C-alpha cells in the first residue's frame, strides 16, 4: 500500500500546486483588466494624453504574458498527469506475486494481438513497463461472455489453466485471432459458362438450330420456293436460394470476432457451392438444370435436348483411347475454347494414362494459377462430377461458354431481423439464380462403358 499512498500524495501535491498557480495568475489578470477598463474610460475624456496610452499598452502586455503563463502551466500539468498515469499503471496492486502473473499474461496477450495485426517485429519486443493494464483487465472481464450458450453461462467448477477440460480453454491469451476453417471443394462451371444478368424472373434466348434450304438449278429452269429456317426460343427461369442463421444479440455484441462478417462469408460460400452443384446435377425443379441430367444423343447426330456421350473404352475405367476419341467427337469450332471437367480423384487416374509411345497424356501446369493440360486442353477440377464407375459420366469436355448459360437475377441480399425471434438476431439471406444447357453440341460427356 506504500506505493499507492506515494502516488496519491504526488497527485495531491500536483493538483494543489496547479490550483495555487492558476488562482494567483487569475487574480492578477482580473486586477490588470480592471485597470485597463479604468484607463480606457479616462482615455475617452483625454485622448491626447500619451501617458494614458503608455499605461494601457503596459497593462495589455502584462495580461498577454499572464495568459501565456497559464497555458504553459496547463501544458506542464498535462505532462505531469501523463507521468502520474504511468506511475499508477506501474504501482503494485495487492500481492506482488499476483501482480507479476497478471503482467505476464498481459504481455502474452499484447504480443498475440500485435502478431495478429502484423505489427510484432523480430528484435523489437513489447516493453512490459508500458502495457495498458486497464485495457487488459477490461478485456479479460468481457472475454467469458463469448462462451455463453443460450444466454446461460457455462457451468463453473474448479478451473485450472493447465487442464483444458477444467478451464484451460477459458484462458484468454490462448485464443487465436484466426479461425481454422474446413475447405470445401466445388465446381467452376460458372467461371467457364456464359453469365447473363437480368431484371425479371426469366430470360428468353432465341435458338437458331435450323438451316435454310438451297439447291442447284439450270439456267432456264424455274425457281420454286425453298425452305425458310425457323427460329426457336429457350426460356431459363431463375430460382431462389436462401439461408436464415441466427445468433443472440449478446453474442454479436461481445464475441471476439465479427460474427456478422463471419456468417456472411459462410453463407456466400455455401450459396456458391449449392449453385455449382445444381449446374452439374440439378434437375431443373426449383433449381437450375445441370449438364448431366439430359439423355444421350445418338453418335453422329444432333438432337436438341440430348448430349453426346462417348464410351470410355472400358467397362469400369477410363482409357487413353476414350479420351482421344472424345476430343475428336466435337466440331472444330468448339475446340478453341475446349476444356476438361472432372473430379479431383478422376484427374489422379487420368494423370497415369500414357500414349502408344509411353508418354503421359497429362501435363502439369507450369505457372501458378494455370490449369494442367490433357491432350492440349486445360483440366478443371469439379467436385460435383461423379466418380469413375460402370455407367457413370465422370468427364465432360467442350466449350462450356457456348454450351451453358448462368442467369443472375439478384445477388446475395441479407435482411437483419432482431425482432422476430428475440433474443436472437436472424440473418435472412437470399439469392436468385438460374442455369441451363443452351447449346447441346458444344460439349460431350464420357460414359464409362466398353
Image (cartoon, helix red, strand yellow):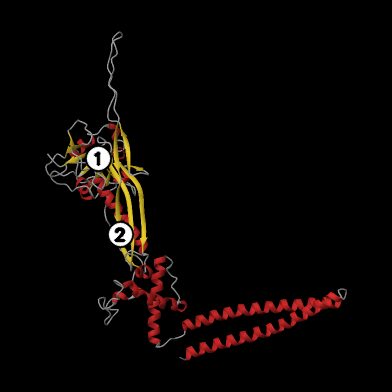
Residue 37, image quadrant:
bottom right
CB atoms of marks 2 and 1 within 8 Å: no
Looking at the rendered structure, the secondary structure element under dot 1 is strand
- Comparing 20 with 313, the one in front is 20
Q: Point out residue 381 in the picture as x, y percentages from the top left corner.
A: 26, 48
Q: Residue at x 55, y 80 (%)?
A: 81
In this rendering, is residue 228 above or below 291? above
**Residue pointed to by mark 2:** 244
Label drawn at residue 12: none
Q: Nearer the viewer, mark 2 or mark 1?
A: 2
User: In terms of sequence position, does the residue under pointer 2 or pointer 1 come before the other?
Assistant: 2
- Comparing 339 with 38, the one in front is 38
- In this view, the residue farthest toward the bottom is 2
Quick one: quadrant of the C terminus?
top left
**Residue pointed to by mark 1:** 397
Q: Residue at x 34, y 46 (%)?
A: 408
Amino acid at each position: 500500500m506504500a506505493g499507492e499512498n506515494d502516488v496519491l500524495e504526488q497527485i495531491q501535491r500536483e493538483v494543489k500546486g496547479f490550483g495555487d498557480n492558476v488562482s494567483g495568475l487569475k487574480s492578477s489578470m482580473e486586477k490588470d483588466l480592471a485597470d485597463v477598463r479604468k484607463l480606457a474610460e479616462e482615455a475617452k475624456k483625454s485622448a491626447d494624453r500619451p501617458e494614458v496610452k503608455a499605461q494601457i499598452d503596459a497593462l495589455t502586455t502584462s495580461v498577454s504574458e499572464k495568459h501565456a503563463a497559464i497555458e504553459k502551466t496547463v501544458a506542464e500539468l498535462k505532462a505531469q498527469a501523463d507521468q502520474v498515469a504511468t506511475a499508477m499503471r506501474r504501482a503494485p496492486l495487492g500481492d506482488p506475486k499476483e501482480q507479476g502473473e497478471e503482467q505476464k499474461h498481459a504481455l502474452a496477450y499484447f504480443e498475440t494481438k500485435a502478431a495478429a495485426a502484423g505489427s510484432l517485429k523480430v528484435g523489437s519486443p513489447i516493453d512490459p513497463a508500458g502495457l495498458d493494464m486497464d485495457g487488459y483487465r477490461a478485456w479479460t472481464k468481457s472475454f467469458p461472455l463469448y462462451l455463453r450458450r443460450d444466454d446461460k453461462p457455462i457451468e463453473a467448477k474448479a478451473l485450472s489453466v493447465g487442464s483444458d477440460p477444467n478451464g484451460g480453454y477459458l484462458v484468454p491469451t490462448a485464443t487465436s485471432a484466426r479461425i481454422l476453417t474446413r475447405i470445401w471443394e466445388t465446381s467452376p462451371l460458372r467461371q467457364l459458362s456464359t453469365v447473363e444478368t437480368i431484371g425479371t424472373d426469366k430470360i428468353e434466348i432465341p435458338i437458331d438450330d435450323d438451316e435454310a434450304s438451297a439447291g442447284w438449278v439450270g439456267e432456264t429452269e424455274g425457281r420454286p420456293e425453298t425452305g425458310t429456317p425457323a427460329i426457336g426460343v429457350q426460356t431459363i427461369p431463375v430460382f431462389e436460394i436462401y439461408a436464415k442463421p441466427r445468433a443472440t444479440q449478446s453474442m454479436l455484441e461481445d464475441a471476439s470476432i465479427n460474427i456478422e462478417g463471419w456468417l456472411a462469408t459462410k453463407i456466400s460460400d455455401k450459396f456458391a457451392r449449392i449453385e455449382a452443384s445444381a449446374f452439374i446435377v440439378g434437375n431443373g425443379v426449383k433449381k437450375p438444370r445441370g449438364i448431366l441430367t439430359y439423355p444421350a444423343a445418338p453418335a453422329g447426330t444432333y438432337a436438341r435436348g440430348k448430349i453426346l456421350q462417348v464410351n470410355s473404352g472400358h467397362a469400369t475405367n477410363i482409357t487413353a483411347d476414350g479420351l482421344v476419341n472424345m476430343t475428336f467427337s466435337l466440331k472444330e469450332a468448339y475446340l478453341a475454347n475446349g476444356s476438361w471437367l472432372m473430379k479431383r480423384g478422376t484427374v489422379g487416374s487420368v494423370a497415369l494414362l500414357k500414349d502408344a509411345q509411353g508418354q503421359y497424356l497429362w501435363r502439369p501446369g507450369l505457372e501458378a494459377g494455370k490449369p494442367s493440360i490433357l491432350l492440349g486442353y486445360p483440366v478443371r477440377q469439379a467436385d460435383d462430377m461423379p466418380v469413375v464407375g460402370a455407367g457413370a459420366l465422370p468427364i465432360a469436355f467442350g466449350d462450356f461458354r457456348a454450351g451453358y448459360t448462368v442467369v443472375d437475377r439478384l445477388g446475395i441480399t441479407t435482411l437483419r431481423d432482431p425482432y422476430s425471434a428475440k433474443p436472437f438476431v436472424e440473418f435472412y439471406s437470399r439469392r436468385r439464380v438460374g442455369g441451363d444447357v443452351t447449346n447441346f453440341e458444344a460439349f460431350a460427356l464420357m460414359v464409362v462403358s466398353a
